[in-house]
Amino acid sequence: MSTILFLLNTSFLLGLLGLSFHRTHLMSILICIEAMMLIPYLMMTTLMSTTNTPTTAMLPILLLALSACEASTGLALLVATTRTHGTDHMKTLNLLKC
């Protein structure tokens, strides 16, 4: 079980590194954030399956619903910025120009 948690922690850190180093496109930022939201979901589901606690079985479903809302909001922002600015490069998005 510890190897699974180690791999999940490592993949979360890889998503965090991808978020901090590859910030050229808005789509790559959204993919990294989505990966960072799916890793705690996987951690919670593995924890729930090993401990068999029914009181906290609703937490992974709630986290998955919140990550779906986050993904839809991010895609709506991606479409809106692509329509207004013509690209999703982060260097062209400046809030002071708007």
Image (cartoon, rainbow, N blue to C red):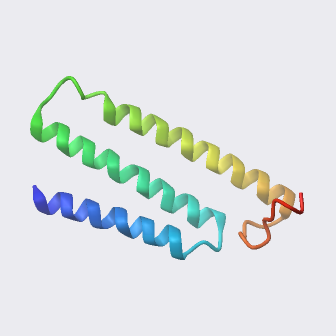
Residue pictured at 35% horizontal, 62% vertical:
12
Residue pictured at 26% horizontal, 48% vertical:
43
- The residue lying furthest to the right in this view is 97
Q: Quadrant of residue 55?
A: top left
- The residue lying furthest to the front in this view is 96
- Where's residue 50, x and y in %? 11, 41
The relative height of residue 77 versus residue 55 in the rendered view (above or below) is below
Residue pictured at 14% horizontal, 29% vertical:
53
In the image: residue 48, left or right of residue 51: right
- Where's residue 13, x and y in %? 36, 67
Residue pictured at 52% horizontal, 60% vertical:
31
In the image: residue 86, left or right of residue 2: right
Q: Quadrant of residue 60?
A: top left
- The residue lying furthest to the top in this view is 55
In the image: residue 9, left or right of residue 21: left
The relative height of residue 45 versus residue 78 in the rendered view (above or below) is above
The answer to which of 96 and 21 lies nearer the viewer is 96
- Where's residue 87, x and y in %? 78, 67
How many numbered badges does the structure rendering display? 0
Location of the N terminus by quadrant is bottom left
- Where's residue 21, x and y in %? 52, 76
Location of the C terminus by quadrant is bottom right
The answer to which of 95 and 10 lies nearer the viewer is 95
